[in-house]
Amino acid sequence: MTTQAGKKPKKNFPSKTPKHGARYVAAHGVREVLVDGTPLDLALSGQALFAQLERRDRAFARLIAATVFRRMGQIDKVLAPFIKKTPTDYAQAVLRTGAAQILFLDTPAYAAVNGSVALLRRSKKTAHMAGMANAVLRRVTEQGKDLLSKTTTLDNIPDWLQLSWTKSYGAEACQKMADILILEPPLDLTTKPNISGPRGDMLPGDTIRLAKAGDVRELAGYKEGGWWVQDVSAALPIRLLVNSLGCLKNKRVLDMCAAPGGKTLQLAAEGAFVTALDKNEDRLKRVRENLERTGLSATLAFGDALKWRDPENKNGRGFDIVILDTPCTATGTYRRRPDVLHNKKPADIDSLVRIQEKLLLAAARHVAPGGTLIYCTCSLQMQEGEEQITKFMLNRTDFRHNSLLGIEDLGVAESVTSEGILRVLPHFMHEKGGMDGFFVAMLSCS
Ligand SMILES: C[S@@+](CC[C@H](N)C(=O)[O-])C[C@H]1O[C@@H](n2cnc3c(N)ncnc32)[C@H](O)[C@@H]1O
C-alpha cells in the first residue's frame, strides 16, 4: 500500500478549506485502489489526513471516491475528448474526482474545478499538470452534461465483467445489474429472532432495511445488540438452513471462514454451538466485538482452514453443520463496494478458484455422517459458485443436494435451480434497492 498510513501529510490543510482535505483524500484513495488494488475503505482510512477530517468531510471524501467507482466508464467517456496526453495516475484520479463532483454531486462547478486544480498545485511534482486539469475540468463544466447523455450505465461495468455476466445471466440482466450500480444502497440489519430493531422496511426473512446508511452506532438498539449489519443476501444461507433443517439448537456448527461474523451471529442466535474459524486475526477480533455487543457466544478459532484440526473432535465424528462462506472476488457486493469492479482482474478468479476448491474439500472433511455442508459466495462469477459445486459433486458421491424447504418465505423461490442451488443477482428487489449477488449450495453427507 503506497498511502503512508500513520505518517503526517506533508502540509496540513487550512481548516478554512476543509473540502480540500476531502478532495485530497478522495483523489489519493482512487489512485491507490486502481494502482495497488487496495480496497477503497482501506485506501481512504489508511491516509493520516482521513482521521483529521471532520465527520462530514470524511463522508464527502467517501462519496466522491465511491461515485468515481460507480460511474467510472461514464466519467472517462466525458473526459476523453479533452485529454490530449495520458495523465499520470494521480492526475487522472484528480480529473475523475473533479468530474464526479461536477457531473453527479451537485458541487458548484467553480469549487470542483478550483479544488481539483489546487490538489495538483500543492506539490512540485504535480504542479505542472494544474493548467491541464483546469482546462479539462472547465470543458467538463461546459459540455459534460451533453456528453454524459450519450453514455449509458453499462459503460460503468468493465468489459471483461460485462462479457462474463452476459454469458452467465443474459444481456438484459447485465443491463439491470449496471442500472443498480449507480444507486446508493440501503442499509440492511439482521435481528435476533423475535427482537425488533429500528423502524424500516421489513424484507422477507426478517431483515430490516433502512433507506440511508449512516453511522450505525447511532441507530436505536445498537448498544443493546439486538441486531447487526448484514445484507439481505448474506443472511440467506443461514435462513435457508433454519427453514430446511428446523431448529439449530445445540447443533455443532463450524463456520469455517467466519469473519466479520454475520453468519456466526445468526447461528449463535439460533442456539447452535458455533466454532468460528478465520485466519485473519484482525478480522477475528471483529467477530469477538460483534459477539460481545450482541451478547451471543461462539468459540473463536484462529487458524488456516486448510490445516485446522478440531481440538474438540475426540470421537472423530465431525460437525453437524459446516458453513464455508468462501474468500472470493466479492463481485456481488459492488453496490456497497463499487471499487471491486475495478481492483479485481480475471487472473484473481483463477487463483481464488484454486483456493476455494481446496477449502471445499477441507470443509467436507469436517462434516459428520448425515450432516450438512453449505458452500456460499458473494461472487457473481460462476467459476466461484456453480462450477465449484459441479466439480465437487463429480468427485464426492457421498454428498447430495439438499432440498431447500421454506424457500418461499424468503422471497427468492424463483432463484432456485432444480438441483436446489440458490443464485440471487444484485438487481433482484430493484424497487427496494437491490441485494448483493450471492450463491448458495446446501449439501447433505451420507
Ligand atoms: C467472505 S468472508 C466471510 C464472511 C463471513 N462468513 C460473514 O458472514 O461475516 C471470507 C473470510 O475468509 C477468511 N479466510 C480466507 N482464507 C482463509 C483460510 N484459509 N482459513 C480461514 N479463513 C480464511 C478471510 O479472512 C475472510 O474473513
Image (cartoon, helix red, strand yellow):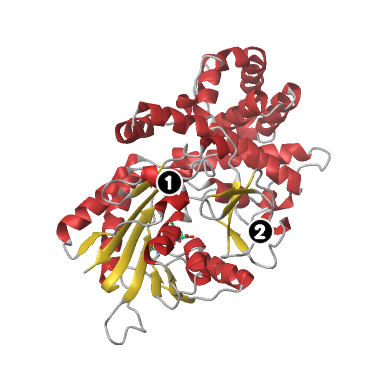
Q: Measured from the top left, where is residue 214 in percent x and y?
A: 68, 48
Q: Residues within 10 Å of mark 1 (few under 14, many from 20)?
A: some
Q: Residue at x 58, y 67 (%)?
A: 290
Q: Residue at x 60, y 38 (%)?
A: 184
Q: Residues within 10 Å of mark 2 (few under 14, many from 20)?
A: many
Q: Amino acid at mark 1?
A: Val
Look at the numbered discs 2 and 1 and tell me whether their residues touch, using CB distance below 8 Å.
Answer: no
Foreground residue among 208 and 376: 208
Q: Is residue 90 above or below residue 50?
A: above
Is residue 186 in view from this perspective? yes
Q: How far is disc 2 from disc 1 in space, using C-alphas?
A: 23 Å
Q: Measured from the top left, where is residue 192 in percent x and y?
A: 58, 65
Please, what secondary structure does the residue beneath circle 2 have?
loop
Q: Residue at x 31, y 87 (%)?
A: 314
Q: Is residue 191 above or below residue 48?
A: below
Sequence-earlier tag: 2 or 1 = 2
Report the disc number at residue 197.
2
98 displayed left or right of 266: right
Q: Measured from the top left, where is residue 240 in percent x and y?
A: 41, 58
Is residue 89 in view from this perspective? no
Which quadrant of the rendered structure holds the C terminus?
A: bottom left
Q: Measured from the top left, where is residue 40 in percent x and y?
A: 55, 45
Q: Is residue 391 above or below residue 366?
A: above
Report the disc number at residue 358.
none
The residue indicated by pointer 1 is: 412
Q: Quadrant of ligand 1?
A: bottom left
Q: What residue occupies the far right of the structure in this picture?
A: 16
Q: Amino acid at mark 2?
A: Gly
Q: Residue at x 54, y 38 (%)?
A: 31
